[in-house]
Amino acid sequence: MKRRDFIKKAGLASAAAFVAPYILPSGRLFARTGTRKVNHVVFCLFAGGIRNIESVNQGESNLMVNMLNDVSGGFTPQTGIDQILPASPIGSSRLQDFGTLYKEFRFKEGSTGHYSGHVTAMTGRYHDSSLNLRANPPYPTIFEYYRKHNGANITEDATKSWWISDSLGPYPLLNYSTYPGYGAEYGANYIQATSLISNEGYNAIGLPKTFDSTNDKLASELKGFCDGTFGNQFNAGQSGVINTPENKEVIKGFIDELFQDAISGAGYNSWGFGGEMNSDLQNIYYAEQVLKKFQPELTVLNLQDVDVCHSDFTGYCNNLRKADWGVAHLWNTIQSTPGLANDTVLICVPEHGRNISPNTLLDAYGRPAFDHTNDNTSREIFSLICGPSGVINQRKVVTDIEGESIDIVPTIANLLGFDTDIPSGLVQGNVLNSAMV
Amino acid sequence: MRYLYIILLLIMSFSCKKDKKYVYQVQEVFVDQPGAEKPNVKKSTEYISIAYSDIFQKSIPSELLDELTQGYVAFADVTIIEDLIVRNFLNDNDAIVPTDSQMRADVPTFIKACYNQFFGREASGQEAWFLQKLIDENTGLTPDVIYYSFLTSNEYRQF
């Protein structure tokens, strides 16, 4: 072997030896540093502004009989707060029995606004009043950390993370940030299902022309030719989140399934709420469909119907009861879905609370209404973390002031094994180790 | 003596010759790559409005634009929604798309019209050849499939 050939081949061998350990059997390019505790996390922003007085302290009796054990007696009907909900979907067990309840969680800093609370919980950082409601968050979201720091497979497959919001407004912006090195390339698949699966949505995208397989292939060939000769290429950010061609077809099929479901009478009609169905329950229903279809590793959904409390305290209590029922239904769905059962942690946290003092409005039953304007009570929230008994402490109640909104992101990252891969300084919170076995 | 002057004159005329200076330069050639002059991405409302106009030959009603925009923001992958919107447009009975026989009666004119209408430019020789060949070799290829391909291409999304 000539000297030059030897040097060349030795160099290639060294390079291969250097690279090879990182190409793992799973297809991951770079290994996570940490170990996974579970393979799926569902984060439910139990949002809209909920006071601990009505939730964990049960000041209006137990309005959350599916999630929380009774403090003193169960639910006591009152005038206007007397709707009979469907039978408890989890039978005799409350969600609290499957995990750890932090009764004195805090949203310590920043404006007690809905978007601010959402951004804090989803980025692991408090934000000041400069937060722009018309722009993506300035710091990376949990989705970006997840997709960037879990290897090539997850970076390429956007269907492994979903953000399912109850409404539009600024919430679609929460699936990725403007932070350098992160962004749309690592964003979640976002869906606001009640807008998409609607009459308007059906008119817009519900009746697509389909081609036979030959013409589908020819269309791809021609489109590929056009794109190949075009100098500028679309990239993530310009077109939102990018899915692989295969996943695009699966998603289109999924959207069609949701339309067909709605046309034939949405599945949630069987839940027994009739005209009392609200957008929180609908959002939970669609989150369940996403979970069953894609079995994502990271799912975030939110609920906000309790925010009627600005003018309707009775409606707030009723919607809190519905949210409680819905979350229990979600837990049941997780536990009855192969692949998710016993391998999923569910985290529920309000984004903030509400004021101790009422505003000047009274509802139809004469009950005073409450806003959320940064007083101490509006910073008091709870957190419930449920999961497999080998991962999450069961039937544990933390009564001291412990845990903050900013701790959710590092906790999710820890559960999925990439918390130590997040660059230092980006996330302000800590892992909620007291919930872990 | 006279001869001497003539000889000297002849010698002087051949003795020093000024060197020619050759200057080598690169001739500027403008390569007209499609897309080089289309650096901007259409906003969602622009994309929908223009696609509607191209398919229906009229302006999009404002109520329909609102509905379509809502669908746009309700899902993260814009390309999926755009694909479904375009397919929905093409499925509409009012869509103005040439028939297969019209296309095949004069393929070069059809190709020219497609590039003019959707990309706002002429087809290059290669592009015209490729599409002509695709149409000729695939008798089942219909104009709506070609329209769909143009409308969902990257070049159509930019200006």
Image (spheres, coloured by chain):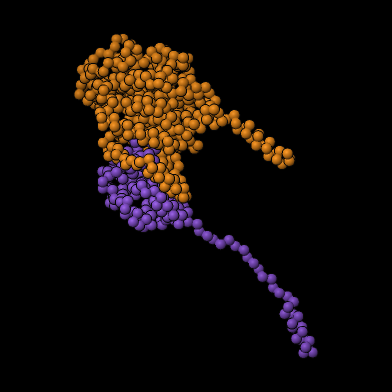
> According to the colouring, which chain is orange?
A
Observer able to see residue B12: yes
Q: Going 55% across and 28% down the picture, which residue do you hit?
A: A24
For the residue pair B112 and A408, the one nearer the viewer reads as B112
Closest to the observer, A2 or A95: A2
Residues B102 and A233: in front is B102
Residue A15 falls left or right of residue A203: right
In the rendering, at what x and y percent does residue A63 appear?
29, 17
Q: As displayed, is residue A337 above or below residue A169?
A: above
Quarter of the view holding residue A30: top right
Q: Residue furthest top?
A: A72
Q: How many marks?
A: 0
Work out whether A13 lies above or below A217.
Answer: above
Q: At 53% from the left edge and 30% from the top edge, which residue is drawn? A: A28
Q: Position of residue A295 (x, y in %)?
A: 41, 26
Locate residue A244: give its quadrant. top left
Question: Of residues B88 and A313, which is closer to you in this image?
Answer: B88
Q: Residue at x 28, y 34 (%)?
A: A198
Quadrant into which the N terminus of chain A falls: top right
Q: Colour of chain B?
A: purple
Which residue is at 37% across, 14% downward? A96
Q: Is residue B88 above or below residue A59?
A: below
* Residue B43 quadrant: top left
Give coordinates of residue A255: x percent, y percent: 34, 34
x then y, percent, for residue A376: 37, 22
- The residue sitting at the bottom extreme is B2
Residue B42 visible in image:
no
